[in-house]
Amino acid sequence: MTTDHYQEVHYTAATLHREAAHHFEEAAKHHIEAASADDGDDVTMTSVHAYLAYGHQLQAVHCAELAAQADGSMDEELPEPIEG
């Protein structure tokens, strides 16, 4: 594997990790908004924010999976846990 190839893959994985984090943050914000709307008995806005949260969660998981594939972490075995 060349250095150029490594940098390209690393950049792609880093970008995907950031994109996943962004979507997880947006999902959390919408969950909070859904909870606030539910506290106020606003069924419509509860549904809207819950739907948007769900969409962001799906995007986040998708990006996280792509990032794991791009950086090869899915191909590696996890290290043994350190007991102590």
Image (spheres, grey):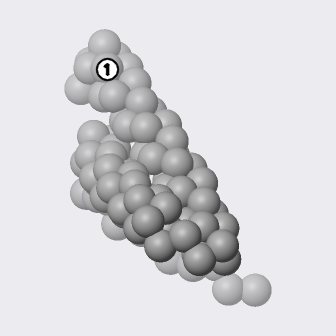
User: Where does the image place residue 81, in percent across and percent down from the top left?
Assistant: 57, 78
Answer with left or right where residue 80 lies relative to residue 82.
Answer: left
Q: Quadrant of the C terminus?
A: bottom right
Viewer-proximal residue among 56 and 75: 56
Compared to 15, does 22 lie above or below?
A: below
**Residue occupied by mark 1:** 8
Q: Residue furthest top?
A: 4
Instruction: Tell me the residue at 66%/67% (across/down).
Output: 36
* Amino acid at pointer 1: Glu
Compared to 46, does 48 lie above or below?
A: above
User: Where does the image place residue 51, in percent across and percent down from the top left?
Assistant: 36, 62
Answer with left or right where residue 66 lies relative to residue 36.
Answer: left
Answer with left or right where residue 67 lies relative to residue 44.
Answer: left
Q: Residue furthest bottom?
A: 84
Which image quadrant is residue 78 in?
A: bottom left
Viewer-proximal residue among 47 and 68: 47
Viewer-proximal residue among 66 and 24: 24
Which image quadrant is residue 7 in?
A: top left
Q: Residue furthest right?
A: 84
Instruction: Tell me the residue at 25%/57% (across/down).
Output: 75
Instruction: Tell me the residue at 49%/37% (across/down).
Output: 18
User: Could you tell me how many numbered marks the image carries?
Assistant: 1
Is any part of residue 6 visible from this angle?
no
Q: Quadrant of the N terminus?
A: top left
Viewer-proximal residue among 28 and 70: 28
